[in-house]
Image: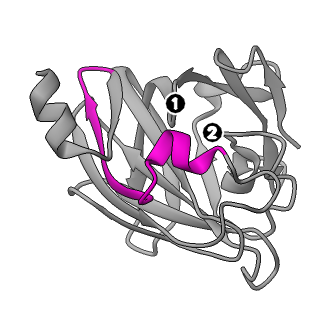
Amino acid sequence: MSTQEDWWGKATVTIQYKDGKFPYFEDTELTVVKEDMYRSRERGRMIYLSGRLVQDGKVVFKRIPPVAAVLVDAQMMQTEKGTLVIKYVPGVRLYVVEIPSGYRGYAIVSAEKPCITTDILRSPRGSLGEVVHVWSNGSNCRIRYKITGRTGTAGYEYLPRIFGENLEGEIVLQDGQVRVVFDEELERALE
């Protein structure tokens, strides 16, 4: 079960152990964008990590408003069998960008390689929607997104504020900063 401290400061996830030896967490427990509406996260991915990243039975991500978090001294890799592993690598930062869908919707995401994408369903079959996490082993990444589903349902009204009225655009992760670009013409005019 995740706990939240200082909403824009830290996202803390409790670690479990497979076979009493291998630390892991479920990506359903990591909430970056909005805590109160994601209590219904049902199915996601198991992510193993180095014990050197665990502090008092938890792993601590630092939030980067409005849609990202970072884990310091960490790098994600995927084994040949598809298992996700976060390794301890000094000086490297692992970024995670969270893109939720509207009620009963989904998120269409395309990211530059070598990003890794994981999907979280908000009910056993995903009928209440989904959340996509994009994991990046570096400070520069571009992610295209399109969000579907209802935003007028209670708890989802924040989506147009963060992701634009059309719920479509690009998230730019550059030099540790995150920008959500949903009006490219306005962005160019303000440069």
Q: Quadrant of residue 144?
A: bottom left
Residue 26 percent location from the top left of the image: 72, 54
Residue 85 percent location from the top left of the image: 51, 51
Which residue is rendered at x = 65% and y = 14% of the image? 9
Residue density around tag 2, few if under 14, some if 14–19, many if 20 or more, within 10 Å? many
Q: Amino acid at mark 2?
A: Val
Secondary structure under the numbered disc 1 in the rendered image: loop
Vertical side of 16 occupied by 66: above or below: above
Residue 109 versus residue 152: which sits nearer the camera? 152
Question: Left or right of 23: which side holds 186?
Answer: left
Question: Left or right of 105: which side holds 28?
Answer: right
Whole-Å distance between the Cαs marked 1 and 2?
7 Å
Tag count: 2
Q: Amino acid at mark 1?
A: Pro
Q: Quadrant of residue 150?
A: bottom right
Residue 173 versus residue 155: which sits nearer the camera? 155
The span shown in magenta is 158-176
Q: Quadrant of residue 180?
A: top left
- Asked whether residue 162 is drawn in magenta, I would say yes
Vertical side of 169 occupied by 34: above or below: above
- Asked whether residue 100 is drawn in magenta, I would say no
Image quadrant where one finds the C terminus: top left
Which residue is rendered at x = 64% and y = 31% of the image? 51
Residue 14 percent location from the top left of the image: 81, 36
Task: Please report contact status of discs 1 and 2: CB closer than 8 Å, yes or no.
Answer: yes
Which residue is rendered at x = 54% and y = 40% of the image? 161
* Location of mark 2 (residue): 33
Image quadrant where one finds the N terminus: top right
Residue 187 versus residue 138: which sits nearer the camera? 187
Residue 21 seen from this side: yes
* Location of mark 1 (residue): 66
Vertical side of 82 occupied by 68: above or below: above
